Image (tube, rainbow, N blue to C red):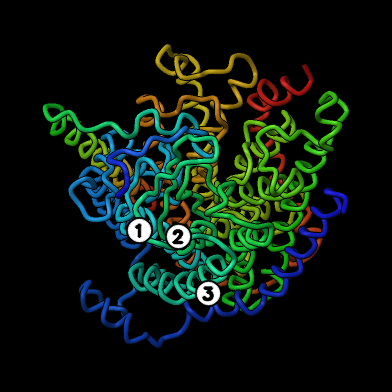
């Protein structure tokens, strides 16, 4: 019923440049690489937070 | 009726409604987190999660639980976005690009709801409901849990246990956020917010053009967007969209929702420490800052002296303003969304006058304290109260104590780490963006306004606000990646320091008030707290404010 990919005129209030990066399909060859990159980045950031916690615990002692 | 008068009447109505909810809601929040009785549904969830609800956690274990829960949430949401095309209710939308999916996952798990996408053309119904809306509930519940654990630091002694994170987060969601959301959602839907699972409709307009009308279960998600101080809109134009915010009544109701829990939490604090006047003092500080913010933005936005003929005819600068609501409602919404960590908008913040926008930026820079985000406002202002007690102790020779706990060097180190996190994140990220070619490429406005846009973006992300000035191409990979990192660090690093401080307080033996104790329940202390907040934030961000909005406004 609806179009396969609705086309909107992007008017941004809360989100500048919204839609610029959205709506594109995945490039099959790059998918695993980019997904691994961002999963890895998540792990790195939370590992850094964990290290902050360990540092604070050490400071506490 | 004069628009300005209508705006102030709306403000008065809002104030009365919030004041009426302060005691009952605050008492209820305190009850939720102090009662020993578990609901059946809660016991079922604890069994599923393998949690012993009676087992209290040491502060560092509490933090580990938050980090583990949030890391899993980011990865789950990321996966959902990346696979949306293969899932039901996708509205035939493609998978979300990796960098946008990651930024969005970090954004919603941290209660920020910064959106580098247009919801109606990027996210299908399932991702919105099972991904984004779920995180709007859970991230708010996490913030509230941290605030409650922080309060327990004052109420407990000779222990390092601050409660059980899994119990707190479950109770916050089940007993507070979901019930209010059901009632609030029905109010919004009854008032015209849409609620359906229709496929997008393509219609022919009177001029013969084709227009695509999106749908979705908007009303039920709109309520938690505001109530949980999230701010992530179903549609790109957020609360300026008639499907999200159809009438002036829903507009004021949404502002009420976003202020409701943060303003009631000081009452819960007063109740839990068994001294309601402590809660009144903190609530008074929050109200003072909020009123000044509303007044300031309203004043500058209503000013027609420099705006030319169009501004004079419209009784204010109307660019970027939703004409259904007008300039006063825009000012009230803008001030309320930036002093909380909500970030929902009903007008374009980039179109605010330079000083009006500067106040919005300053509100965010305050760091979620007046009244701040769900829970985040409470633990933020408690830390600033501790700093104020310490400063007062240095100035007038009083013993630095707060709610019967001594403020020693170790507590001050935690408070300093907490307070320094934000400027380090914001100014470093903004500096790198302005100083590198990759960051400069996305700055679409030159001069002071461009600087304001960059600083506002990172202040908003670090403080988990989520509103934005337009004009910055924040969908560029640089801003998506740095923004995601800033949001995660800006949310969880301060929580680590806040809970470390709470653990340190909980280990202490309470000290009885003496002649040397500063009374922290007086207007004098409230005034000192306001002054400390303004001086700390003002000094930290003065160069950025001077070179950005002040320079633009005085030009």
Give residue B129's mark: 1
Precedes in sequence: disc 1 or disc 3: 1
Asked whether disc 1 touches disc 2, contact meaning CB atoms under 8 Å apart, the reply is: yes
Q: Nearer the viewer, residue B208 or B70?
A: B208
Q: Chain of mark 2?
A: B
Precedes in sequence: disc 1 or disc 2: 1
Q: In the picture shown, does residue B450 fall above or below B365?
A: above
Q: Secondary structure at mark 3?
A: helix
Q: Nearer the viewer, residue B318 or B265?
A: B318
Q: Chain of mark 1?
A: B
Left or right: residue B314 compared with residue B408: right
Precedes in sequence: disc 3 or disc 2: 3
Q: Quadrant of residue B258?
A: bottom right
User: Residue at left 78%, top 43%?
Assistant: B298
Residue at the spot of label 3: B183
User: Is circle 3 on the same chain as circle 2?
Assistant: yes
What percent of the width, then of the height, locates residue B84? 24, 47
Q: Residues within 10 Å of mark 3 (few under 14, many from 20)?
A: few
Q: Secondary structure at mark 1?
A: helix
Q: Nearer the viewer, residue B170 or B162?
A: B170
Q: Is residue B162 visible?
A: yes
Left or right: residue B377 compared with residue B307: left
User: Residue at left 67%, top 27%?
Assistant: B545
Q: Report how far apart the C-alphas of labels 1 and 2 lie in the structure.
A: 8 Å
What percent of the width, then of the height, locates residue B373? 54, 55
Q: Residues within 10 Å of mark 2 (few under 14, many from 20)?
A: many
What percent of the width, then of the height, locates residue B266? 63, 67
Q: Is residue B516 visible?
A: no
Give residue B221's mark: 2
Q: In the picture shown, does residue B303 fall above or below A59?
A: above
Q: Report how far apart the C-alphas of labels 3 and 2 lie in the structure.
A: 12 Å
User: Residue at left 68%, top 72%?
Assistant: B513
């Amino acid at each position: 019923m609806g179009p396969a990919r609705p086309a909107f005129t992007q008017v941004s209030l809360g989100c500048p440049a919204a839609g610029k990066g959205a709506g594109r399909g995945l490039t099959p060859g790059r998918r695993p690489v980019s997904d691994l990159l961002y999963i890895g980045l998540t792990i790195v950031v939370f590992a850094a937070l964990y290290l902050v916690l360990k540092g604070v615990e050490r400071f506490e002692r | 009726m004069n628009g300005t008068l209508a705006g102030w009447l709306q403000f008065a109505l809002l104030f009365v409604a919030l004041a009426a909810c302060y005691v009952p809601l605050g008492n209820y929040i305190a009850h939720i987190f102090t009662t020993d009785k578990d609901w059946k549904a809660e016991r079922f969830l604890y069994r599923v999660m393998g949690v012993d609800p009676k087992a209290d956690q040491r502060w560092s274990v509490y933090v580990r639980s938050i980090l583990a829960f949030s890391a899993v949430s980011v990865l789950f949401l990321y996966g959902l976005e990346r696979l949306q095309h293969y899932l039901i209710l996708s509205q035939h939308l493609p998978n979300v690009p990796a960098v946008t999916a990651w930024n969005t996952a970090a954004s919603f798990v941290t209660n920020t709801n910064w959106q580098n996408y247009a919801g109606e053309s990027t996210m299908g119904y399932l991702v919105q409901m099972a991904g984004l809306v779920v995180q709007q509930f859970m991230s708010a519940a996490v913030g509230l849990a941290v605030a409650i654990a922080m309060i327990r630091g004052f109420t407990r002694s000779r222990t390092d246990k601050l409660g059980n994170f899994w119990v707190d987060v479950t109770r916050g969601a089940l007993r507070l956020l979901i019930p209010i959301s059901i009632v609030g959602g029905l109010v919004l839907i009854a008032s015209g917010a849409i609620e359906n699972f229709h496929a997008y409709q393509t219609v022919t307009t009177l001029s013969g053009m084709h227009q695509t009308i999106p749908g979705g279960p908007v009303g039920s998600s709109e309520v938690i967007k505001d109530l949980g101080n999230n701010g992530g809109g179903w549609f790109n134009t957020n609360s300026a969209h008639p499907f999200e915010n159809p009438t002036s009544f829903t507009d004021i109701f949404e502002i009420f929702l976003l202020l409701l829990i943060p303003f009631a939490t000081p009452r819960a604090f007063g109740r839990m420490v068994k001294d309601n006047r402590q809660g009144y003092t903190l609530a008074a500080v929050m109200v003072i800052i909020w009123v000044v913010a509303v007044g300031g933005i309203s004043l500058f936005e209503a000013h027609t002296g420099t705006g030319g003929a169009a501004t004079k005819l419209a009784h204010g600068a109307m660019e970027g303003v939703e004409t259904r609501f007008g300039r006063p409602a825009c000012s009230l919404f803008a001030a309320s969304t930036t002093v909380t960590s909500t970030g929902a908008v009903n007008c374009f913040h980039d179109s605010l006058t330079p000083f009006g926008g500067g106040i919005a930026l300053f509100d965010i820079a305050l760091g979620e304290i007046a009244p701040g985000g769900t829970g985040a406002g409470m633990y933020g202002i408690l830390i600033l109260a501790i700093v104020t007690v310490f400063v007062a102790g240095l100035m007038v020779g009083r013993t630095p104590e707060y709610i019967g706990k001594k403020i020693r060097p170790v507590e001050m180190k935690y408070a300093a780490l907490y307070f320094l996190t934000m400027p380090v994140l914001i100014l470093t990220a903004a500096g790198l963006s302005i100083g590198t070619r990759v960051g400069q490429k996305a700055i679409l406005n030159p001069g002071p306004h461009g600087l304001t846009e960059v600083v506002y973006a990172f202040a908003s992300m670090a403080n988990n606000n989520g509103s934005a000035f337009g004009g910055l191409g924040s969908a560029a990979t640089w801003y998506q990646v740095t923004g995601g990192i800033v949001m995660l660090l800006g949310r969880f690093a301060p929580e680590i320091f806040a809970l470390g401080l709470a653990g340190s307080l909980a280990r202490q033996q309470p000290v009885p008030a003496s002649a040397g104790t500063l009374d922290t329940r007086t207007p004098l202390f409230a005034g000192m707290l306001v002054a400390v907040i303004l001086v700390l934030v003002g000094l930290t961000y003065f160069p950025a404010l001077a070179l950005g909005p002040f320079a633009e406004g005085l030009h």
